[in-house]
Every structure is written in C-alpha cells, then in structure tokens.
Amino acid sequence: MAQQLCASSDPPGPAGFGPDRFLNRELSWLEFADRLLDLASDPRRPLLERVKFLAIFSTGCDEFFQVRVAGLHDQVAAGLRKRSADGRSASEQLKVLREKAAALVERQSAIFVDEVRPALQAAGIRVTDYDQLDEASRRRFAMVFEREIYPVLTPLAVDPGHPFPYISNLSLNLAVLVEDPRRDDRRFARVKIPTLLPRFVTIPEGGDLVPLEQVIAGNIAHLFPDMTVGDHYTFRVTRNADLDLEEGEADDLLAAVEVELRRRRFGRAVRLEVEPGVSREVLELLLDELELSPEDVYATAAPLDLGQLWQIASLDRPDLQEPPWAPMTPPRLATAGDEPVDLFAALRERDVLVHHPYDSFATSVEAFLQQAADDPDVLAIKQTLYRTSGDATIVAALARAAEAGKQVAALVEVKARFDEQRNIVWARQLEQAGVHVVYGVVGLKTHAKVILVVRREEDGMRCYCHVGTGNYNADTARAYEDIGLLSTDPALGEDLIDLFNHLTGFSRPTRSRLLVVAPERFRPWFVEQVAAEADKGRDGRIVVKCNGLTDPGVIDALYSASQAGVPIDLAVRSVCSLRPGVPGLSETIRVRSLVGRFLEHSRLYRFGNPPDARYFIGSGDLMERNLDRRIEALAPVRDPELCQRLEDVLTLVLEDDTATWELGADGGWRRVAEVRGVSAQRRLQELAVERHRRRRLPESLD
C-alpha cells in the first residue's frame, strides 16, 4: 500500500506520499450512502426504521446529484483542468461515480422490492403496484382518481404548436405516447405528478398503498378522450440546484438570493431516472430535450423518488418503530417537580452542557431565549440563524423581545442550501417586528451557532452565551445529536460581542480570547493543536468527532502526528478523505463512523489525555468549505464535570459495536463486529434518564 501511495509525480506529501494518500471526497460520500443501505437492509432494525433509511438515502442522493455531481459537470463544461486532492479530473470522477451510484441505486431497489416491501406486506402495510390490484380494487381506485386526482392534472402535448415542456427539478412525470386514430398522428405528452397529493394513494375500503403515478397511469385514458393511449413511462429529472452568487450582486444579498432561487428551477439537468423497459423512442427524446447522455440515465425497478417513503415511515405503527424517546430536562435547569427555573441564576452558578436529543431543546435553548425575551433586565439579544423550524418558537421569542424594546439582532443566513426561501420568510417576519436583521456576509456562509444575551444586574452588565454544534431548530433537535454550552464566562461573552460586531457592522475580525473562528483561525488553530500533540509523540492524544474530514492541510497535519506516534481516533459520520492504517503514514489513526437512530451531528475536538485534555465544541467540520468559506465558531469546555461528560460521549462513540463501521487503508468501510453489544445512543438515553431520576430523589437519598 505504501509503495502504491508513493507512485505519483505530484508534489509529495508527508514522507514522500503522493495524492493517493487522500480518498476521493465524492466516492467517500457514496460509501456513506452505502452504510445507510446497510441499515435499511438490517432485519434486526424496526421495519419502519428501515423504511426511513431508504428515504434518507434517496433524499441524500438527490442533493448529491444536485450539488456535487452538478459541480463536476460544470467543471467539464468549462474545460477546467482542476484535479481533486486524490489526483482525478472531473471527467474521471464522473465516470467512477456513475458506476458506484448505479450500483447503489440497484441495491436500494432490491432492498425495497425483495426485502422491505414483503416485510411491510407481512405486517399489514400493503404497498401494491396498480397492475396487481383485483378488478374491484381498481374500480375503487378509479373513483378516487376521478374525484381527487383527475381535476388537478394538466397533460402537455408536444407538437409544432407546443414545444417540449420544461421539466422542473425533482418532479415526477409520466411520458405518454398518444395516437389520433382519425388522423393517424402520434404525439408525445407529459403529465406532471402533483406534489401536493399524497405520494401513496389509499382507499377507505382497503389497506393497499399504491404509488400515485401508477394510479394516474392506470387511468391515463381519461386525460386523452377519443385518443389511443400507447406506451407510458415514469421519469424524473435532477438539475443543478446550487446557488451561484456573484460578488457584484452583494449590494443587495437578499435580492440576489431570490434571483438565484428562480434560476435554480432552470438549472442544467444532470440525472434522468426512468422505470425499466422504457422504450428507445421515449428515452432518446428525453435525452435529446434534456441535453443528457446515456451515462446520465438511472433505471430502477422500485418506484422512483423513494424519498417519499417518509409517508410510510411515519405511519402510526409503534410496533414497527423504535421505542418513543422523550428528551430529558437537564438537571440544573428544572426543579424536582419539573417546574421551570431561573436560567440566569442557574448559569451564574455554573456552566451547563446540553446534549440533544437526550437533553430537551425546549427546556434548555428555547427556554433560555424565551426567558431572555420576557426578562425586563435583558437589554440585548443577538443570534445567528442558519436553519430554523416551522414552529418558529425562537423566531417568536426574538420578535417579542424586539417589540418589548430590547436591542435584538439576528444574522439570518439566506444562503443556507435548500432552506433559502424559508429563511427569507423568517427574516422578513423578524424585520417587521423590529429586529435588526443581517442577511449573511458576502462571500461566506455564517454557519456558527451562537447566542449572546446581555443582562443588566446589580454588579453591572453580564453576558449569557450559548455556543452549539447544531441549528436552532426544534425539529432537528429531536432527531440530530448535538451539543451546546450555556455559559457566563466573561471572556466568551467579550468574544461573542466582537464576533457579532464583525458580522453586523463594518469591522475586521479581532483575535479571540476563547472562541476559535473560521475562516481566520480555524485551520491554523487546529494544525497548532495537532502539532502540540505531535511534539509529545506516543504520549500525545487526538480524538475528533465530526461530520466530514476532507481538508488536505488538516489531513497532512494528522498524518505527521501519526508518524510521530500519536494515537488518533476519528469518529467521522459521513465523508472522510483520510486514509488510515497505512504503514509509515497513518498507522496510529483509526477512523470510525457511527450511523444510528439519531443523526450524529456534533463536532467535538479533544487534544491531550485526561486530566489535562483540552475539549472544544462548535459548528465547524474539517472540510474546505467550513475552514475557508464559512464563519464557524468553536468554544472550549473547561468545567471538569462537563469535560467528563464529553469524555463519556467520545468513549461511547468509539466503543459502539452495534451501528459502527471502520475505514480500512484500502478505502473500504467494514461493519464492526458486535462483540459487547455497546450501543452509544441507547446508553446515552439511559444516562439522561439516570440524571433525571437523581434530580428527583430527595436530598437524603441522593
């Protein structure tokens, strides 16, 4: 392996290793997608959890093609010669990605058709193809079609007077060949499947769930009276959906984003999904009109767009789902009787660490903001908003605070991918309430998760801070694993004051006291921390928990530390370009990926060994986008008790053998054999319950 890695004429990396020391970023994401399919295929998991992972795989693939594959197509079209860190051109990457993606789509289809759908059938959830229904059922579905579906359909024919219709991004469609028997004339027509109707149609008299497009196809003759309907096929188009903002548009960032959102609908097509057996005539017409090649076609025996399986995954069948989980209120944020506490008084006593979804988001972060909004002694609230949820508790609290006369500033990142329109709506609501709204920073995405509350107290002004790893989103806080620090540390407060002044005003970023802020300091800070451990040799220690690791400079720093003998553990959920276990390069590095019921989302960095270990949490992953093109914020956790909680999290994640994969030197991921049956997520639930119970015990029994 080492000799293979050195066989490159590119500039050498550590110890003469070439670009082969990096794994391809895009292939690494597809490996993560493969792990999702492993979970969907696992018969030990609750059935509707398996359905959920099929849906997650599909929506993840949609984004992968809309952004990553689309970006490679753009490079080829522009004639760029840029190569990836592992030395591949864009066209070379597209070729290998196509082969891997096609294999994954085929695997997903087989899991659904051969494993999940029969299991659903056995459990009384009949996902049935229309052509498998008996005649009586077809008549009942025909009545549903005529009453609820037919009125909203709009067939579009293609002829000299009607050009080929625009096929919008990710829309599901029927391609129909129609003949006029009187004029012996045959035409192509497109029927768009309405997105506002349920993806799977059912009838009160039976339990069959039939894909909507099949119900339409089975009654397609109603759309073309007095015509002969020939072949018809389902297809779906994926387009480039990444925003492309020019610096010249920065005078009005909000207007620029709105323009780009309209352009997104007309992005270049990058993928065509079809059902098997589509005729050559229809396929060639679609490829010609969409300007795609046969290599961009993906055929699947399963219904297209299995991302809509959420409709089935959310069915009210507790017997087919994970046991429900109710997040616990952190012990220091509630009384034994669960009455709310004065959060400001609690934070003055000691910092609080919250770990979602094990700890409640509602009784910690949301309660913090609500108390700040209603407290007459709070003078100012400042917050970043990257993604927030539909219930808008946080938005309402900020608006209420502004209406009460407090100074409220919100940095709303309107460039948050696929949430741009929603964020524009929230931003305008906040503006109408009197909040000072800033729409991001030109050239950068503000990804930091920070809140600053300034309160007038007897001994002067005091800053209350929150620094987190996840979005201020009540929905994802129930499904994503994230960590947050609530603190009154004066140095942290001063850092947040400076950061918000930089984000909302016209000032250069200052050197922080505690915060590590990207893009100015994150990479050099991380490299410095790694170098400090490398100086210790085998007595050093590095543990990282993050979502992605792709930055070449960071990876080379970790390689150098490994060559110095430093034990390094990396828990990387999805994309990882580091190649572990290579003799002479990365022998002391272990890379694992935990993929479970909750999405592992926290970023946690530990340097050194206890009791002298240094712990940091924050918003940034070790990827070029986070280090160079985003504003990120990491904060140290220094309270010994809270550091021990973080150590417990890292220990459990690295010991998990029920939902963990390990990366090999060859770039392949292999599932860790279950020996002890350690489930990190289940154990963290148990620990949250234990903390909750201890809080409720009388003092004499505690």
Image (tube, helix red, strand yellow):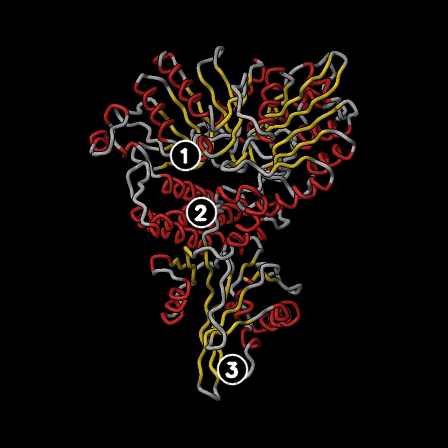
Cα gap from disc 3 to disc 1, whole angstroms: 56 Å
Could you classify mark 2 by the number of other residues whose Cα lies within 10 Å: few (under 14), some (14-19), or many (20 or more)?
some
Find residue 632 and report its horizontal and vertical position in percent: 52, 29
Q: In the structure shown, which secondary structural element does the residue marked by tag 2 occupy?
A: helix
The residue sitting at 50% across, 28% down in the picture is 603
Q: Which residue is mark 1?
A: 661
The residue sitting at 33% across, 51% down in the picture is 99
Q: Nearer the viewer, mark 3 or mark 1?
A: 3
Q: In front: 508, or 131?
A: 508
User: Looking at the image, is mark 3 or mark 1 earlier in the sequence?
Assistant: 3
Cα gap from disc 3 to disc 2, whole angstroms: 41 Å
Q: Which residue is mark 3?
A: 227
Q: Amino acid at mark 3?
A: Met
Q: Nearer the viewer, mark 2 or mark 1?
A: 2
User: Looking at the image, is mark 2 or mark 1 earlier in the sequence?
Assistant: 2
The residue sitting at 40% across, 70% down in the picture is 282
**In screen coordinates, is 406 left or right of 470?**
right
Could you classify mark 3 by the number of other residues whose Cα lies within 10 Å: few (under 14), some (14-19), or many (20 or more)?
some
Q: Is residue 605 above or below residue 671?
A: above
Q: Which residue is mark 2?
A: 67
Q: Nearer the viewer, mark 3 or mark 2?
A: 2
The residue sitting at 42% across, 22% down in the picture is 524
